[in-house]
Image (cartoon, coloured by chain):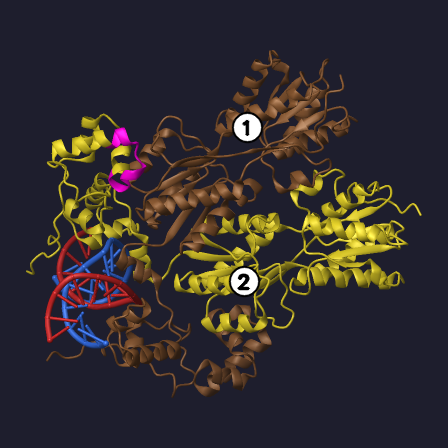
Chain colours: A brown, B yellow, C red, D blue
Amino acid sequence: MKPITYISREVKSMKNKITIEDIAKDANVSTATVSRYMNTPSIVASETAERIRKSVEKLNYDPERKVPKNATIEEVAQLAKVSKATVSRVLNKSNLVGYKTKNKVLHAIDELNYQPNLIARYLRKQETKLLGIVLPDISNPFYSKVLKGIEEIACSLEYDVVLMNTNYSEERELNSIQTLIERRVEGFCFMCHHLDEEKMEFLEKSGMPYVMISRTVYTNSNIPFVNIDNIRGGYDAASYLISQGHRRIAIITGPGDDECSSVDRFTGYRQALREANIPINPDYLKEGDFTFARAQELAIELLTLDEPPTAIFAVSDETAIGAIRGAISLDYRVPEDLSIFGFDDLEMAQFYNPTISTIAQPMEDMGRKAAQILINIVEKKPVEQIQLVLPHEVIVRESTSICKR
Amino acid sequence: MKPITYISREVKSMKNKITIEDIAKDANVSTATVSRYMNTPSIVASETAERIRKSVEKLNYDPERKVPKNATIEEVAQLAKVSKATVSRVLNKSNLVGYKTKNKVLHAIDELNYQPNLIARYLRKQETKLLGIVLPDISNPFYSKVLKGIEEIACSLEYDVVLMNTNYSEERELNSIQTLIERRVEGFCFMCHHLDEEKMEFLEKSGMPYVMISRTVYTNSNIPFVNIDNIRGGYDAASYLISQGHRRIAIITGPGDDECSSVDRFTGYRQALREANIPINPDYLKEGDFTFARAQELAIELLTLDEPPTAIFAVSDETAIGAIRGAISLDYRVPEDLSIFGFDDLEMAQFYNPTISTIAQPMEDMGRKAAQILINIVEKKPVEQIQLVLPHEVIVRESTSICKR
DNA sequence: CTGAAAGCGCTAACAT
DNA sequence: ATGTTAGCGCTTTCAG
């Protein structure tokens, strides 16, 4: 018979030692305060600190055990007088453990206030139940809505998410990916500006599952994404304006061609105008950057043209709001003098004054769908479709009207 | 001399084996596609899949090595012909490693495309460089702004954040804390509704550092928090309205007393009215829930009173916007017929129509300060102040004016 | 300056 | 039904 080796580590019994609670009682403060004092003395009020210090001295408290160290599975095993394996079985709800044994273990877990160490478990199991989310700006309502959808599905499927906010920086995008890989997340959701095909290749080679959100990959049918049809969205927006009799229709786009959603919406706009035989007036094409402030400036530029537009298609609701502010500052009335059409249907679109006509994107649902696809890939479950184009909706509200001229 | 044991595990040389790239070449697709096919065949277009399948068969590709397994430190060590310890030293920028050795290691790392496994490192070092964030709704602009501030500091100090969205559910709040503890995050930021003193005690006992945001703990000077002075904020808002000649000032609060920010703002409102000798009219006290829709309803209730208020103090900007919409629906003009004062200074407050007078909270800064305090506690650095009350600001815009009656 | 060996806390294959 | 053992991939003494 082999010697039992798992009693090698000594479990310090707390029973006959001075505990934090004794100190608390003696110094007449909460255990919380004592614990805090032990960890970071500087944050406890000086008079309180002094009292605690004296009690510690008086009771000869062993300063070794500062942080209430988490119990390990081994300690639970010892207390329950079983092996680590059995404790592990109880933890993982294996049914091949006897009723009485299980109870002993449960009691020990309770007594020691044992919290399994997921780091250790994950190292052993080679999984992390962690998803990485990379996005440019969490305070942008579009991204935060999508994130909410992702989180909802992830959480329901027992995954947690670690969030990387890149501030639109390409460098931080790259660093985030690197960190996430090193943390061994099981997959990524990307909402990126700077992620080009080359970097996607890099990702593919790393073998890490990922899905892009709010981005359409036209060139490779095997890269998963979730998006709406932005070309069609832009087309629908412009078409609606045309249907209301507008012919002098300006557009305020997003910056450059970094953000392909904006480019696609612009494409749709051009298409609608072409079909209606409306020539594109270059003066009516303004490049914004999705901010209120810039859109406001651009609207003013548009409205001070010799022949100002009667309608503006703003490629985001923020842009639309900026444009409305610009129009108002020139004493234009919206929609009487100028129609403005937005994009996204952020919550504020229906509460703005005037309420904003817009193309509704299913933002939370995009997040949900993306998370679902990602997790299916991670778990090697069948995925019916990895490139998802969700439906959008034309929402007509107060900011647009029939063209009076 | 002891035998060298670290050559025990065999490193599969990729040189003389059929690789994914050979398949790719043969099937005339990208390596990405092949890799994807290997992991989740169902997501590759069927014709492509068929071609790959044939190539795999033809080249007799070893299907064992599906996912490009990450190299381990041991493999790096073997390739560089040094010990794991030395590789580890290079990784951790220890300066007691020779120049030539270091170079060998660096090359091996490069060649194997080695990515350190942080799970293993963290298990060994007993740290995770992870912060847990618990908040009720990430799509609420207030929380997302705070989160952005947290993330900024965390990132700059080499921490990552895992996000828990509780949807205002007490159960999910508790579960989140549990999960976060098991994941061994090094500290929490809480923005909670249901976290009462009892649960704080529980947390304290767990020894886990944490800081509350947007919540003032009046009863215990040792629990860290970052907030503004909401009583004073409410007082300032109401006082401003009074200074403009208003005496019939209604308030739309948050729900119940769960959210103490709202309660505090209400307290400040009462205080300001008392000082101005304005009796509180119970008809003017409406309990909202921070949503646009509810605020809109309540504003309508207020304005259809026999003696409607001339001003409404809404305890959040969303509430203010809802109230404005309600007023407009009754053909009230804001601010000519009714002044409306908000709270928070969300970005949209300065772009709403009319722009909204409000109390500005330094949201991102609250996040930054909280993260900084938390990390200082985690790293046992001195913390000058653990209970921080940040300054707010009265911002006067278009939604308020002098009382005409 | 470098290597050997001992674990971090857990799970899982293999015994019994 | 339960125990033993061997790692997961890394860092860190301790030797030399």
| Residue B46 within the magenta-colored segment of the rendering | yes
Q: Which residue is mark 2?
A: B211
Q: Which residue is mark 1?
A: A233
- Give the chain letter at badge 1: A
- What's drawn in magenta, residue-wise? B38-49
Q: Disc 2 to disc 1, how far (Cα)?
A: 44 Å
At mark 2, the secondary structure is strand
Between A61 and A293, the residue placed more toward the observer is: A293
Q: Is residue B107 above or below residue A77?
A: above
Same chain, labels 2 and 1: no
- B184 relative to C4 in the view: left or right: right
- Residue A138 visible in the shown view: no
For the residue marked with disc 2, what is the amino acid?
Val
Image quadrant assignment for residue B40: top left
Q: Is residue B324 above or below residue B370?
A: above
Q: Is residue C12 above or below residue A69?
A: above
Identity of the residue drawn at 44% across and 55% down: A156
- B71 relative to A168 in the view: left or right: left
Crowding near the residue tagged with mark 1, few <14, some 14–19, many ≥20 C-alpha atoms within 10 Å = many
**Secondary structure mostly seen in the magenta stretch:** helix
- B157 relative to B353 in the view: left or right: left
- Residue B358 visible in the shown view: yes
At mark 1, the secondary structure is helix
> Looking at the picture, how far across and down is residue A73, in whole percent?
30, 71
